């Protein structure tokens, strides 16, 4: 059934609920999870920033983003360890989170995705869009959505 479940996390209460659900599902199916975190690319701006400074700032930003992701994964690993579930992790830099989620699920050979949705609707949903909705629309995998 679902032997490898990808679960995006940003450390929020809602995404922690998705991690908990993915771990429970993996326990039922004797599976494992793949914790996923994406961060946006560095942008220094075009005005008054020297190239050397941009490079230093970009490196510091990337190190900080990866350290933040690793901190999120520590919590996921602790939860999974308590349930006896194996965890793999993926961190990626992107502005297209939904595409990265689907790409990671393919690369890691997942057979399901478990993710949170903030339930944006109306004008906010139109303007901000929904990463969850985009994943649902573009993947062929089953997706468990928690709200």
Image (cartoon, rainbow, N blue to C red):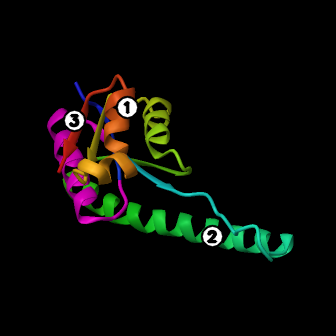
Q: Is residue 33 visible?
A: no
Which residue is labeled 1 in the image? 110
Disc nearest the viewer among 1 and 3: 1
Identify which residue, 42 or 125, lies in the foreground.
Answer: 125
Horizontal side of residue 6 vs 97, given as left or right = left
Q: Residue at x 42, y 34 (%)?
A: 105
Mark number, residue 61: 2
What's the mark number on residue 30?
A: 3
How many numbered markers are drawn? 3
Q: Which region of the structure is painted magenta?
A: 9-33
Among the two numbered marks 1 and 2 on one chain, the one whose residue lies closer to the N terminus: 2
Element under disc 2: helix
What type of secondary structure mainly makes up the magenta span? helix
At horizontal 61% and vertical 58% (from top left) the residue drawn is 41
Query: CA separation, marks 1 and 3?
Result: 14 Å
Residue 123, image x, y percentages: 30, 51
On whether residue 129 falls in the magenta region, the answer is: no
Q: Is residue 100 visible?
A: yes
């Amino acid at each position: 059934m679902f032997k490898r479940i990808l679960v995006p996390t940003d450390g929020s209460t809602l995404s922690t609920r998705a991690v908990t659900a993915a771990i429970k599902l993996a326990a039922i199916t004797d599976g494992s999870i793949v914790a996923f975190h994406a961060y946006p690319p560095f942008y220094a701006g075009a005005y008054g920033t020297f190239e050397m400074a941009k490079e230093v700032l970009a490196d510091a930003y990337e190190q900080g983003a990866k350290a933040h992701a690793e901190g999120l994964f520590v919590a996921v690993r602790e939860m999974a360890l308590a349930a006896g579930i194996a965890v793999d992790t993926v961190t990626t830099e992107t502005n297209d989170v939904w595409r990265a989620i689907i790409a990671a699920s393919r690369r890691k050979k997942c057979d399901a995705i478990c993710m949170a949705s903030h339930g944006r609707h109306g004008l906010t949903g139109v303007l901000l869009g929904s990463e969850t909705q985009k994943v649902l629309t573009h993947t062929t995998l089953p997706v468990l959505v928690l709200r």
